[in-house]
Image (spheres, rainbow, N blue to C red):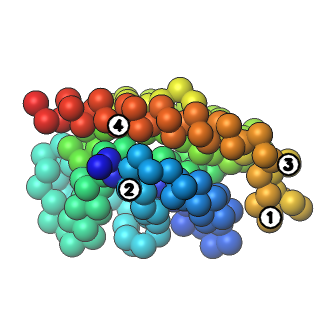
Amino acid sequence: MLRIATILGSTRPGRKGEAVARWVQDYARQRDDAEYELVDIADFNLPLLDEPVPPSQHKYSKAHTKAWAATIASFDGFVFVTPEYNHSTSGALKNAIDFLYAEWNNKAAGFVSYGSAGGTRAVEHLRLIMAELQIATVRSQVALSLFTDFENFSEFKPAALHQNSLKSMFDQLIAWSGAMRTLRSH
């Protein structure tokens, strides 16, 4: 069975992403086409890139990197839950992504973003990063607005219309994750 991680891409105190990631996971657990797990980058306490050798060499020396690598390697696909900070993704998510290389290769990713413009600019940047890591990204994405999907800009209350986008994103992600698994087996 495919394994899909919902990666919570914010470590900021009071982050809105935690509620968004739980919403994604609640939906995913209703599906029977994969195993779904929430992966919170905050749990790994990754410092600013502290490995002496580039990740493409796959010579990790730090315990936190090895734990992060083992976690990411165990999945076939990813849903990145990302805020939009200054027209991009969070520095914490970018840092977590940059710690690894081979563990990301030939897998698939979808995106759930949030921000004043729905987080779409963060996803645009993530798509470029994913391409370099040999991750295939699906077209469908969920873009949540701080104005309409968060009451008083704080309590997450997604509009019902996002369920269709979430379903579409997961349908594409499962199809692509299965296809990419075949590629990894060769």
Q: Are marks 4 and 2 in contact (CB under 8 Å)?
A: no
Of circles 4 and 1, the one toward us is: 4
- Give the mark nearest the N terminus, 1 or 2: 2
Number of dots carrying numbers: 4
Between disc 4 and disc 2, whose residue precedes? Answer: 2
Q: CA distance from mark 4 to mark 1?
A: 33 Å
The answer to whether residue 97 is seen in the rendering is no
Mark 4: which secondary structure? helix
Give, as a three-letter code, the residue at label 4.
Ser
| Among numbered discs 4 and 1, the one appearing first in the sequence | 1
Tell me, yes or no, whether the two marked residues, 2 and 3, touch with CB atoms within 8 Å. no
Distance from the alpha carbon under mark 2 to that under mark 3: 32 Å
- Residue 85 in the image: x percent, y percent? 64, 49
User: Answer yes or no: do the residues labelled 1 and 2 have beta carbons within 8 Å?
Assistant: no
Q: State the residue position of label 3.
A: 147
Residue at the spot 24% in from the left edge and 48% down from the top edge: 103
Between disc 4 and disc 2, the foreground one is 2
| Whether residue 72 can be seen here | yes
Spatial CA span between label 4 and label 2? 12 Å
Q: Name the quadrant containing residue 10.
A: bottom right
Kindly identify which residue carries mark 4.
177
